[in-house]
């Protein structure tokens, strides 16, 4: 099974007729959704986020010939493709269990601040089933942990999407967060 990578890229878009900025969220993924149930949950959160911001999903080709390769060579190849998919400009956050842990309120305030301070967008990078190479971590402006535990990348994606949706509701003062 190939699990791949996910990148969430938050890009500010200025509507020329409005003084309000909105974010565009771009998800770039390698491979497919192997777990259909988690894929369905992710889609539900994507639909919810679409009420606040436009979202684009882009699929990046997954690693071929995995059975004949060791994890280290797969990680190097996936990390190289992942690095190529990270925009040259903008703020890059790599999700890693060694990163900073934020509660939901701090995450929402931090994300809101980034939407103001990062005119070229914000990219969230989640590693695949073999992890991330150090070169990807070095590209990060910040390492962020969803948990100190290692999470399956599809579950981490759902958790991140839920927290982005929660942050959207907090930014707009909409009842959801308890």
Image (cartoon, rainbow, N blue to C red):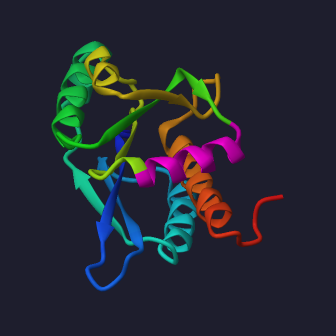
In x, y percent, where is residue 46?
Answer: 49, 66
Viewer-nearest residue: 80 or 136: 136
In x, y percent, where is residue 159?
Answer: 60, 47
Q: Is residue 115 left or right of residue 137?
A: right
The answer to whether 32 is drawn above or below residue 53 in the figure is above
Q: Is residue 121 left or right of residue 114?
A: left
Viewer-nearest residue: 73 or 88: 88
Image quadrant assignment for residue 142:
top left
Give the position of the C terminus as an image quadrant: bottom right
Which residue lies at the image location 51% right of the left edge and 48% below the top edge? 113
Image quadrant assignment for residue 171:
bottom right
Q: Which residues are magenta?
A: 103-116
Which residue lies at the image location 71% right of the left edge and 72% below the top edge? 174
The answer to whether 135 is drawn above or below residue 146 in the figure is above
Which residue lies at the image location 20% right of the left edge and 42% below the top edge? 89
> In this view, which residue lies farthest toward the front?
19
The answer to whether 87 is drawn above or below residue 82 in the figure is below
Which residue lies at the image location 24% right of the left edge and 35% below the top edge? 82
Is residue 115 part of the magenta span, yes or no? yes
């Amino acid at each position: 099974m190939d699990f791949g990578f996910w990148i969430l890229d938050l890009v500010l878009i200025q509507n020329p007729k409005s003084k309000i900025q909105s974010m565009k969220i771009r998800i770039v993924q390698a491979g497919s959704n192997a777990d259909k149930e988690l894929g369905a949950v992710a889609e539900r959160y994507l639909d919810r986020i679409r009420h606040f911001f436009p979202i684009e999903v882009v699929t990046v080709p997954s690693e071929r010939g995995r059975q004949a390769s060791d994890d280290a060579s797969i990680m190097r190849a996936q990390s190289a493709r992942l690095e190529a998919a990270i925009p040259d400009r903008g703020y890059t956050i790599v999700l890693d269990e060694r990163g900073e842990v934020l509660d939901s309120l701090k995450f929402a305030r931090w994300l809101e601040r980034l939407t103001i301070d990062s005119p070229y967008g914000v990219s969230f990078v989640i590693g695949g089933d073999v992890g991330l190479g150090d070169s990807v971590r070095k590209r990060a402006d910040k390492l962020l942990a969803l948990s100190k535990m290692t999470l399956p990348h599809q579950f981490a994606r759902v958790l991140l999407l839920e927290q982005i949706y929660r942050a959207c509701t907090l930014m707009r003062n909409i009842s959801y967060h308890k």
